[in-house]
Amino acid sequence: MTQPNEMTNAELNEVLAVEVMGLAKLHHEGVLRYVEGREKYTSIVWNPAEDLNQAIECAEKLWAGGYPCVELMTERRFIEGNNIEWRAYVDNGCCRWWESINQSPARALSEAVLMAKRGD
């Protein structure tokens, strides 16, 4: 199984939609959409690997499923010429935790959420 930090954004987005959010894939007129019951996600582009709001939706879904701690913080402070790195941390409340570090806060959070969901 491919590790989240080795996935492309498109692969990570698809796996988050199916494994974390519980959405079904629907190909309609050449467009990939994600469906939950009767609600269709057609008006937005599903891209939690780049959209922090959507990454937070995934974290909230995980939190609602019993993961008591989800954090996102800067890993190192900004120094001129360097990019900020973000650290995402997910704890299941039973001495098990997962983390990811990335220059994109959405990507870091998406990776950590998927690792926790899979138990990697």
Image: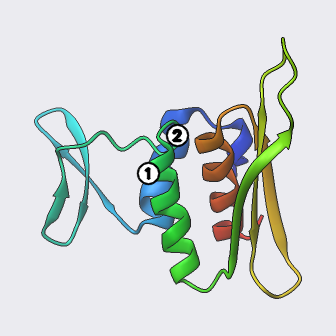
> Eyeballing the image, is 72 above or below 84?
below
Left or right, 51 with reference to 59? left
The label number, if any, that marks residue 54 in the structure image: 1
Q: Residue at x 63, y 59 (%)?
A: 114
Left or right, 38 with reference to 69? left
- Please say which color scheme the image uses: rainbow
Screen quadrant of the C terminus: bottom right
Which quadrant of the figure has residue 37? bottom left
Give the percent coordinates (x, y) of residue 103.
72, 31
Q: Amino acid at mark 1?
A: Gln
Q: Amino acid at mark 2?
A: Glu
Nearer mark to the viewer, of 1 and 2 = 1
Which quadrant of the figure has residue 9? top right
Q: Residue at x 64, y 69 (%)?
A: 117
**Tag 2, which secondary structure?**
helix
CA distance for labels 1 and 2? 15 Å
> Eyeballing the image, is 42 above or below 60?
above
Give the percent coordinates (x, y) of residue 42.
17, 46
Which is nearer the N-term, disc 1 or disc 2?
2
Give the percent coordinates (x, y) of residue 21.
43, 66
Q: Residue furthest top?
A: 81
Q: Residue at x 52, y 40 (%)?
A: 11
Front in this rendered view, residue 62 or 12: 62
Residue wearing tag 2: 11
